[in-house]
Image (cartoon, rainbow, N blue to C red):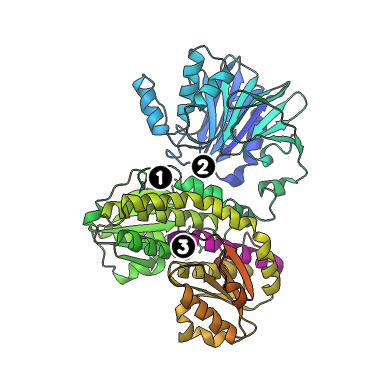
């Protein structure tokens, strides 16, 4: 998630841009830059690393222009360097972009074939080339942007400045947010409310596939065919902190609701509905020669690894072992050049996981990492990286990073299954089609969060919880217990439901809420028996079940229903009510949800 700010007005804009970018700091960034119009030509200033580096550069350069755009980058394509920082300029066109251009490789090849030279590794730079071509064909900046965007596929929120047209920003969006701020003789563009809230409370939320021409004397909005649209400003009454959380009380809640977008961004361009295949960002494996796979991670990421084990063994029939980062390197692991190590890490800095990666590499293993931070240590030391596009995760309790890890494991399992010959093209197409539906179904579950609210109130005073699941939902039971314990401080345990009779059933009484993951599938009848065992001992059963299940409502004390999806994809849905339950119980208990006691967002010590 990058940050964008734009200003067209009467004041020198450098400080306005920097201040706006600073208010988007929570979105995370690894580089930043501005393009400021001076004497009808844009001047680009960019720097790697912290925003203070850009502020220093601007202080030294003292740009005086009153029209400009600024950007903080959270790298998805291309390393976090000054050269890859935005704005990108080509010819007369300067552009900043938030999103992912899916057909960037094809467009780059076409443009290079026409003699274009590229200065960066980013997908964004392509937009500057496309718009400049249209300017050279005689179109004005608005038409040039409209025509260029007809050739672009994927998600974008962009701002464009054109040399020679000194007092207008052309902004457009598709599958990425963009907001217009309405001032008095000055107007703004931003990727999120906090960036400009100190300057104006009157904002226009640019609609999907719309373009805006932002000038001092006003803002014109149109659709991407150039048809004018009437958009009225909304008065924003939030304070600054509320605005950074998107109006949510905590970052964790905001991030829970960001998950459909985060999963869409993670699977987009990595699965093909037409071929039923999947791609791992340029990392290739000779799967037929692969002896085994070991997945290593910690905490929530470890739970994603256990789901990955089920997926890879089911779809690719390759033996998979999952181990904790803190255990793996102490058992002289039996891995070598014919094995693959997969690490999973949101931060890419977890010491235990990094140590496991180094141990496996010492033994000749190739390493593929699933990671959320471009340029992190684990990503740099891996042979291949499948980046999750969750964006910065501020809440210590991992939510959107987890579901994007699950999505990444589906992508890897499809990739392996298609190459090992165990997943046919037809079966791959079916699975890809269902996977692409998941973000909408995640949204459906989240839209019913009020159902979870009622349950959270009923059990927020409990002292212990048990979470039960079978098969691919067993690790989700582990994850639900971890979520609850780490933010509400209630003791919670996740168990394979079949283990109940081997001990945990002794814990069951009327004070023990038991969350049972009981979606339709091959384990259903057995899990219903477990649920009956709990109720026979006066335990309280909170069931997560498939919508339309005719019997479970009569045998559970509380019921949360989710869309009926295939087992491989169920974890992406069954975890959502557990995240909401943990959040709501913790909030009711008044704990520090975003920064729970004793925890750190990234455990960089062993
Ligand atoms: C999960 O909610 C916790 N924040 C923690 O278990 C976390 O998943 C673990 O520390 C691993 O972190 P990583 O994904 O950054 O490696």
- Check the image and report above or below for 28 versus 6: below
Q: Earlier in the sequence, mark 2 or mark 3?
A: 2
The quarter in which the N terminus is drawn is top right
Q: Which residue is mark 1?
A: 273
Tell me the CA gap for discs 1 and 2: 28 Å
Tell me the CA gap for discs 1 and 3: 42 Å
Q: Secondary structure at mark 1?
A: loop
- Check the image and report above or below for 103 versus 536: above
How packed mark 2 is, by other alpha carbons closer than 10 Å (few <14, some 14-19, many 20 or more), is many
Outermost residue toward the top?
A: 138
Q: How many marks?
A: 3
Region in magenta: 565-589
Q: Residue at x 58, y 50 (%)?
A: 258
Q: Nearer the viewer, residue 395 or 131?
A: 131
Q: Earlier in the sequence, mark 1 or mark 2?
A: 2
Magenta stretch: includes residue 577:
yes
The answer to whether marks 2 and 3 mark residues whose Cβ atoms lie closer than 8 Å is: no
Task: Tell which tag, 1 or 3, sits nearer the viewer.
Answer: 1
| Residue 473 locus on image (x, y percent) | 47, 68
Whether residue 394 is visible to the viewer of this picture, yes or no, is: no
Whether residue 227 is visible to the viewer of this picture, yes or no, is: yes
Could you tell whether 135 is left or right of 590 in the image?
left
Q: Which residue is mark 3?
A: 605
Q: Earlier in the sequence, mark 1 or mark 3?
A: 1
Q: Secondary structure at mark 2?
A: loop
Q: Secondary structure at mark 3?
A: loop
Q: Which residue is mark 2?
A: 74
| Residue 435 locus on image (x, y percent) | 45, 52
Task: Tell which tag, 1 or 2, sits nearer the viewer.
Answer: 1
| Residue 246 locus on image (x, y percent) | 67, 47
């Amino acid at each position: 998630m990058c940050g964008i700010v734009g200003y067209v007005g009467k004041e020198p804009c450098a400080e306005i841009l920097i201040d706006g970018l600073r208010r988007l700091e929570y979105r995370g960034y690894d580089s930043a830059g501005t393009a400021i119009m001076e004497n009808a030509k844009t001047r680009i200033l960019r720097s790697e690393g912290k925003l203070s580096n850009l502020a220093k550069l601007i202080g030294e350069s003292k740009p005086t222009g009153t029209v400009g755009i600024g950007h903080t980058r959270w790298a998805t394509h291309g390393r976090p360097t000054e050269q890859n920082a935005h704005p990108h300029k080509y010819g007369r066109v300067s552009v900043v972009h938030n999103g992912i251009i899916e057909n960037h490789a094809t467009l780059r090849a076409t443009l290079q074939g026409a003699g274009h030279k590229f200065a960066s590794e980013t997908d964004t730079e392509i937009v500057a080339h496309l718009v400049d071509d249209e300017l050279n064909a005689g179109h004005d900046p608005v038409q040039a942007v409209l025509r260029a965007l007809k050739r672009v596929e994927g998600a974008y929120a962009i701002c464009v400045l054109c040399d020679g047209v000194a007092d207008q920003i052309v902004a457009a969006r598709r599958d990425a947010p963009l907001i217009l701020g309405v001032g008095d003789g000055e107007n703004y563009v931003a990727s999120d409310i906090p960036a400009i809230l100190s300057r104006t409370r009157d904002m226009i939320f640019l609609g999907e596939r719309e373009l805006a021409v932002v000038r001092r004397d006003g803002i014109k909005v149109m659709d991407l065919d150039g048809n004018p649209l009437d958009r009225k400003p909304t008065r924003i009454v939030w304070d600054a902190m509320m605005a950074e959380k998107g109006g949510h009380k905590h970052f964790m809640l905001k991030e829970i609701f960001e998950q459909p977008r985060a999963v869409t961004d993670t699977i987009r361009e990595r699965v093909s509905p037409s071929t039923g295949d999947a791609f791992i960002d340029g990392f290739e494996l000779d799967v037929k020669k692969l002896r085994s796979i070991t997945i290593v991670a910690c905490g929530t990421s470890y739970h994603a690894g256990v789901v990955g084990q089920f997926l890879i063994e089911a779809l690719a029939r390759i033996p998979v072992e999952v181990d904790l980062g803190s255990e793996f390197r102490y058992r002289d692991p039996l891995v070598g050049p014919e094995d693959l190590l997969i690490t999973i890490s949101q931060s890419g800095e977890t010491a235990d996981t990094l140590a496991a990666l180094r141990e496996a590499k010492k033994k000749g293993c190739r390493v593929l990492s699933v990671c959320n931070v471009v340029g992190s240590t684990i990503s740099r030391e891996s042979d291949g990286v499948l980046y999750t596009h969750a964006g910065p995760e501020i809440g210590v309790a991992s939510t959107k990073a987890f579901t994007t890890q699950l999505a990444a494991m589906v992508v890897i399992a499809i990739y392996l299954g298609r190459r090992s010959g165990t997943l046919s093209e037809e079966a791959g197409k079916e699975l890809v089609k269902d996977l692409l539906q998941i973000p909408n179904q995640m949204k459906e579950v989240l839209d019913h969060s009020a159902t979870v609210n009622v349950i959270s109130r009923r059990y927020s005073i409990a002292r212990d919880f048990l979470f039960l699941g079978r098969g691919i939902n067993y690790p989700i039971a582990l994850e639900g217990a971890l979520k609850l314990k780490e933010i509400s401080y209630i003791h919670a345990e996740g168990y394979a439901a079949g283990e109940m009779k081997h001990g945990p059933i002794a814990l069951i009484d009327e004070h023990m809420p038991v969350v049972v993951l009981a979606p339709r599938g091959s384990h259903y009848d057995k899990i219903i028996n477990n649920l009956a065992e709990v109720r026979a001992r006066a335990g309280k059963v909170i069931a997560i079940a498939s919508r339309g299940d005719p019997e479970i409502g009569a045998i559970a004390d509380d019921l949360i229903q989710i869309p009926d999806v295939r087992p491989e994809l169920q974890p992406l849905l069954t975890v959502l009510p557990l995240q909401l339950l943990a959040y709501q119980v913790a909030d009711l208990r008044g704990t520090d949800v975003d920064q729970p006691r004793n925890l750190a967002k990234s455990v960089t010590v062993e």
